[in-house]
Image: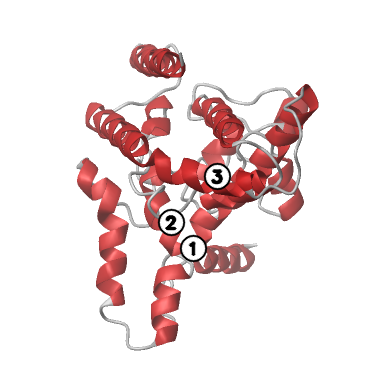
Amino acid sequence: MHLSLAYWLLIGRVSAIALEAVLGARGVIRAHYEWKDTLASLTMRAGNIAVNLLMTGIMFGGLQWAYEHRVISFEMSALAWVVLFVLDDFTYYWFHRISHECRFWWAAHVNHHSSQHYNLSTAARQSWTGILVGTWMPWIPLGFLGFTPTAILAMQSINLFYQFWLHTEAVDRLPGWFEAVFNTPSHHRVHHASNPRYLDRNYAGVLMIWDRWFGTFVVERADDPPRYGILHNIETYNPLRIAFHEWLAMGSEVRRVRSLRGFIGTVFGLPGWRADGSGVTSDSVRAEWRRAMETTA
């Protein structure tokens, strides 16, 4: 039954992508597609599914171990599901933020940001290496709190399912109350933009309250339309390069470092960090942009 549901959800997503592409090509909605880019994203998703099927045992085993050492035991009531939803979304925020601020996890996440287009197919551009490097581990505390691995993985799936529709330019702004509480296409366009104003902002899964509370929220502005992609675009549609380019770059830099500080900073520091201070990070780009804005003000 679970595999059957997953199959129909996959068919539904592919159908939605095809519909958006057709409506965009006819000018009915705002949607820009390039077939090579879309094919690369769909291939990334196929690889992601294959890796997840092969490696889910690692993630499930880790969550099961935590559950077996739980400090609380309870039945999954309606209230428990609501609590799990909030805790899962809170966990997603921090997993997502760390994935942008720690190069080791950024190497597994950067592929999702590598497209210079923003449409529903962008949501399909998923990691091949996330499970291998432990990006599921922030959810282990939920096992200790008494949530079963099945419940945790189900809630993760619901969260990711919600995020699919965020990857579109066809939806402008939603009612103010909705934009205030929930993640929306407008908020997520900010997250995928490489403009200095928008870099590493709006990490939310479903609820925008985390970004607002922790100072990472930015509103999309008409006078600064999002430019999609990463700081140094890789200009390729090759899925292998999309999946592994940052790992290869990091490995190349590690071979050149000559100190423990250099190794730790290169692997676990901000993406773009360099021991000699010559690196370009999101923080340095934003700081330079702010200085330029103050100069011209």
Rendering quarter of residue 155: top right
Give coordinates of residue 231: x percent, y percent: 39, 56
Picture coordinates of residue 258, whole percent (x, y): 32, 88
The tag earlier along the polypeptide, 1 or 3, is: 3
Residue that mark 2 sits on: 106
- Give the residue number, with chain letter if any, for mark 3: 63
Q: Secondary structure at mark 2?
A: helix
136 with respect to 143 (left or right): left
Q: Circle 3 sits in a helix, a strand or a loop, which is it?
A: helix
In the image: residue 129, left or right of residue 245: right
Q: Nearer the viewer, residue 289 or 260?
A: 260
Q: What distance separates the C-alpha of mark 3 from that of mark 2?
A: 23 Å
Specify the amino acid type for callout 3.
Answer: Leu
**Disc 1 to disc 3: CB gap under 8 Å:** no
Question: What amino acid is found at the position of numbered circle 1 in the picture?
Answer: Cys
Residue at the spot of label 1: 102
